[in-house]
Image: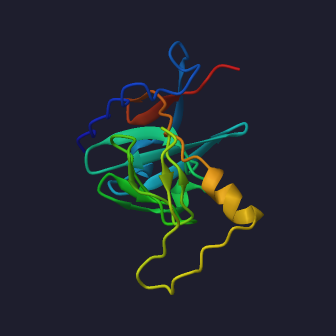
Amino acid sequence: MVEPRVLPIPTGLQAPGTAASPFEAVASFDELPPGTLLRITRGDLDVLLAHTEAGLLATDDRCPHMSAPLSQGVLEGCVVGCPLHAGRFDLCTGETVRFPTTGGLDPEGGYHSTWQPPDRPAKPETADAKAQARAATRVRRLRYYPLRIRAGRIEVAFPRP
């Protein structure tokens, strides 16, 4: 079997504390066939391994919106759908493809209103404390972890304590 391409980390999105960290074997290459997601946990850190159509990568296994596990989402090409609020994120670039249904702030502070998927009835917009909290919730950028393949094993560099 030909080893897949390891994707480069998008500019400015490498997880802090990983630049000089040693690599640790986390899975066999056979455990991550094309189109799959795999969660790896180290302490309180959950990392998502993804075998996208473009190659392999490691990022936070937390939606950058409200921390739902992306490993429980659906991977289509390079885009993972969050199972909680229907946000969609391009794992190959780190970009938000579709803002979560709850709305809120993007990384630059721009506001996005709430929305409903077309197969669901519209919800009225409220002005209560919960709506104010949703409006102030920021969708952060994904963080990526250095990844390599050695002797059929996937290795990741985790932040040093």
- Asked if 27 appears above or below 66 in the picture, the reply is above
Tell me where residue 53 appears, x and y as whole percent: 26, 51
Q: Residue at x 32, y 54 (%)?
A: 34
Residue 157 appears left or right of 129: left
Name the image quarter holding the C terminus: top right
- Asked if 5 appears above or below 20 in the picture, the reply is below
Q: Residue at x 33, y 29 (%)?
A: 8
Tell me where residue 77 appears, x and y as whole percent: 29, 56
Q: Residue at x 50, y 35 (%)?
A: 143
- Asked if 2 appears above or below 120 in the picture, the reply is above
Residue 158 appears left or right of 5: right
Q: Is residue 101 at least partly visible in the picture? A: yes
Which residue is most to the right? 129
Q: Is residue 67 at least partly visible in the picture? A: no
Which residue is most to the top? 20
Name the image quarter holding the N terminus: top left
Residue placed most toward the observer, 153 or 105: 105
Residue 151 sits in which quadrant? top left
Tell me where residue 67 appears, x and y as whole percent: 63, 51
- Asked if 36 appears above or below 157 in the picture, the reply is below
Residue 153 sits in which quadrant? top left
Tell me where residue 89 appears, x and y as whole percent: 41, 52
Residue placed most toward the observer, 103 or 125: 125
Q: Residue at x 52, y 56 (%)?
A: 71
